[in-house]
Image (tube, rainbow, N blue to C red):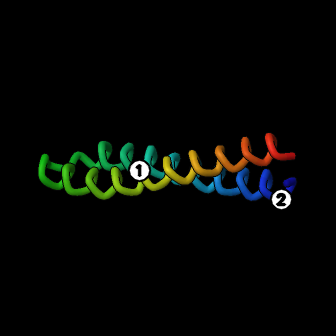
Amino acid sequence: MGNLIWIGAVVTLIGLCGLFWCIFSVQRARKDGLDDTAMKDRLQKVVAINMGALFLSAIGLMMVVLGILLG
């Protein structure tokens, strides 16, 4: 079960990197001073990636907890 913990930790870190990427991407979009439609288009793409990254981090944390409980 030790492998499940480490794999879960890696999956969680990948998800967290995706979340930080989303944060920096939105900050860059705000700094660029886009108009409303361009900002909306860019944020719609970021929201999809944000949801995927959040899903990965949650699944990774579940794997870690499961590995701890079974180990």
- Residue occupying image coordinates x 82% and y 46%: 70
Q: Quadrant of residue 14?
A: bottom right
Give coordinates of residue 7: x percent, y percent.
74, 58
* Disc 1 target residue: 51
- Category of crowding for the residue at label 2, using alpha-carbon neighbours closer than 10 angstroms: few (below 14), some (14–19), many (at least 20): few
* Disc 2 target residue: 3
Say which of 49 and 36 sits in front: 49
- Category of crowding for the residue at label 1, using alpha-carbon neighbours closer than 10 angstroms: few (below 14), some (14–19), many (at least 20): some
Label located before the other in sequence (1 or 2): 2
Badge nearest the viewer, 1 or 2: 2
Q: Quadrant of the N terminus?
A: bottom right
Question: Mark 2: which amino acid?
Answer: Asn
Say which of 65 and 50 sits in front: 65
Give coordinates of residue 16: x percent, y percent.
58, 47
In the image: residue 32, left or right of residue 66: left
- Residue occupying image coordinates x 30% and y 58%: 45
Give coordinates of residue 47: x percent, y percent.
34, 50
Identify the mark at residue 16; answer none if there is no mark: none
Extreme residue toward the front, this view: 70
In the image: residue 50, left or right of residue 16: left
Give coordinates of residue 8: x percent, y percent.
71, 53
Q: CA distance from mark 1 to mark 2?
A: 26 Å
- Residue occupying image coordinates x 49% and y 47%: 54
Q: Quadrant of residue 49?
A: bottom left
Q: Are marks 1 and 2 in contact (CB under 8 Å)?
A: no
Secondary structure under the numbered disc 1 in the rendered image: helix
Question: Mark 1: which amino acid?
Answer: Met
Secondary structure under the numbered disc 2 in the rendered image: helix
In the image: residue 31, left or right of residue 69: left
